[in-house]
Image (tube, helix red, strand yellow):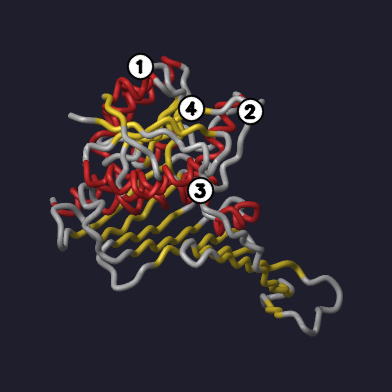
Amino acid sequence: MRYLLFSRPAHRKGAVHMANQRRIRIGVLGAGHLGRIHLQQLLEIPEYQVVGFHDPDPARCEVIQQEFGVAPVNGGPEALLAMVDAVDIVTPTLFHHDLATKALEHGLDVFIEKPLANTMDEARALVALAERTGKRVQVGHVERFNPAFQAARPYLANPMFIETHRLAQFNPRGTDVSVVLDLMIHDIDIVLSVVNSPVKEVHASGVAVVSDTPDIANARIAFENGCVANLTASRISLKNMRKSRFFQRDAYIAVDMLTKSTEIVRMRAVEGEPDPFAVTIDLGNGKGSREISFEKPEVPTINAIREELRPFAMSLLNGTPVVVPITDGAAAMETAHKVLAGMQLQKA
């Protein structure tokens, strides 16, 4: 198989030169839709020196060459791995385990798109290999870096009920895995990141409508601390939606990850005379009143993919832990597979 390596053009507009600072030499595996976006963002992050990329599709390579103005050179995957400090794996999930294994065995740090691997056995093997080699692995759960979620994160404190809806119009890209591993896993990772408790049980149902694996799914995830999360994902919707709602003591947090907006509704006890312009409710039975406040935190305009790739570079440069470690990626996969198992029980 012929592989292509591309060098970053020194004259690229907006490039930042860091002559006196070490930069991470990185290569990209996969130049499809998402791989192209990763490559574009990496080229704009000054902490990286993009050494090259590989994609087996000559047509895709030609598009990349025209878009980024770089010339291809011959070489195999080992040649690419020998030239870099880290690798960004943005291939179909089926190839994650093999490529990440090669990269770790080459002594490289790895950024790998979600889901971490195709099977739990592969995921566990990668976790063990990362621990054995001592290399850093960050998993691309990009919604952690969605500016709307970032704006809501400081307000989240022990939510006890969570509801998410992730609906997408049909796109053949991604149908190599079920909607659970394609879409719902985003929300599974978000939920696991804010609920500080082990999963107790999972109930799920799903239907394959246009592909060979479920295209629409619902899961009820109960945690040992009493929190319940109700997740719905569909890739056959007439409209796109990415909404999450978090309910906790005296607060409701709504996050729209598609429109990049966040709303915080909080209640507090009324002390003294209530504000005549505030919304108040009487709890009755002598329990007093609550004043309701509405807040809309400022949500910055940022690129979530860039926001996940740059901290990976800073982790490698500064020796700090990665933001979404491989163990988090494996935990999200494990819960996703419990959802898939629940669907099988539904059919039985």
The residue that label 4 is drawn on is 25
Q: Which mark is residue 19?
A: 2
Task: Specify the amino acid type for callout 1.
Answer: Glu
The residue that label 3 is drawn on is 144
Task: Specify the amino acid type for callout 3.
Answer: Arg
Residue lying farthest right?
272
* Horizontal relation, residue 185 to residue 138: left or right: left
Query: Quick one: SS at disc 3?
Result: helix
Q: Nearer the viewer, mark 2 or mark 3?
A: 2
Q: Mark 4 to mark 2: distance in Å? A: 14 Å
Q: Mark 3 to mark 4: distance in Å? A: 25 Å
Q: In which quadrant will I find the N terminus?
A: top left
The residue that label 1 is drawn on is 105
Q: Nearer the viewer, residue 254 or 98?
A: 98
Against 31, residue 292 (above or below) is below
Q: Nearer the viewer, mark 3 or mark 4?
A: 4
Q: Nearer the viewer, mark 4 or mark 2?
A: 2
Query: Quick one: SS at disc 4?
Result: strand
Q: Which mark is residue 241?
A: none
